[in-house]
Amino acid sequence: MAIIVTAIEEDYSIDTLKENTKVFLAGGISNCPNWQAEVISQVLDIEGITVYNPRRKVYPAEDPKAVEQQIGWEYKHLQEADVLVFWFSHGSLNPITLYELGRWAHSSDKPLIMGIDPEYLRKQDVMIQTELSRPDVMIYETFESFVEAIRDYFTELPF
């Protein structure tokens, strides 16, 4: 069974520290559907993976330190991740996701699984930039094919 680590409420245990393949769910949170929950529900049965989920159960908007904690948590776990999963959701331009794509996906050789909602407003821009910098990356244009690609990637790994 997959281990799910949710921002920022981590409970380190032997399970959390396993030598699993670590995957970070990079993508929209604010003004976006909770796509992370759907991905998690589809990978829970996969052994040998730890999923870093940056979407908090409750975001304390009134806490002035919340933004700094969130960004720090994401930065740390993006560094630790073995695989980066990006979903560009409708509902927002996903500005932080765009930054993370540029920073992490295009400046490293980490495996990348990427999808773009058909209604995402900057779809063409993201597709062109990705093709230029990571032509090996397949971009999935439906959520269903995106989730299927994630499942396929992790079920084909030799654990």
Image (spheres, rainbow, N blue to C red):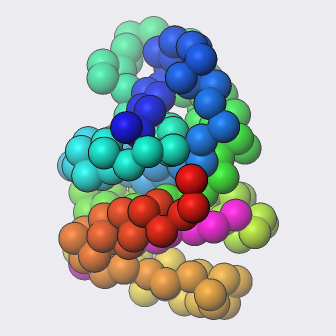
Q: Is residue 8 left or right of residue 135?
A: left
Residue 13 screen position, x and y as percent: 57, 14
Q: Residue at x 71, y 58 (%)?
A: 103
Residue 102 visible in rendering: no
Residue 112 falls within the magenta-colored stretch: yes
Please determine whether, in this image, residue 30 is positioned above or below residue 113.
above
Q: Residue at x 51, y 39 (%)?
A: 50
Please determine whether, in this image, residue 81 is positioned above or below residue 148.
above
Residue 28 falls within the magenta-colored stretch: no
- Quarter of the figure with residue 147: bottom left
Please determine whether, in this image, residue 123 is positioned above or below residue 29.
below
Q: Is residue 6 left or right of residue 41?
A: right
- Quarter of the figure with residue 158: bottom right
Please determine whether, in this image, residue 107 is positioned above or below residue 94.
below
Q: Quadrant of the N terminus?
A: top left
The residue closer to the viewer here, 70 or 121, is 70
Q: Residue at x 52, y 12 (%)?
A: 11
Q: Residue furthest front?
A: 159
- Quarter of the figure with residue 150: bottom left
Residue 56 screen position, x and y as percent: 37, 26
Number of marks present in the image shown = 0
Residue 156 screen position, x and y as percent: 48, 68
Q: Which residues are magenta?
A: 110-118
The residue closer to the viewer here, 28 or 44, is 44
Q: Residue at x 45, y 9 (%)?
A: 63
Residue 4 screen position, x and y as percent: 42, 32
Residue 46 visible in rendering: yes
The residue closer to the viewer here, 159 or 53, is 159
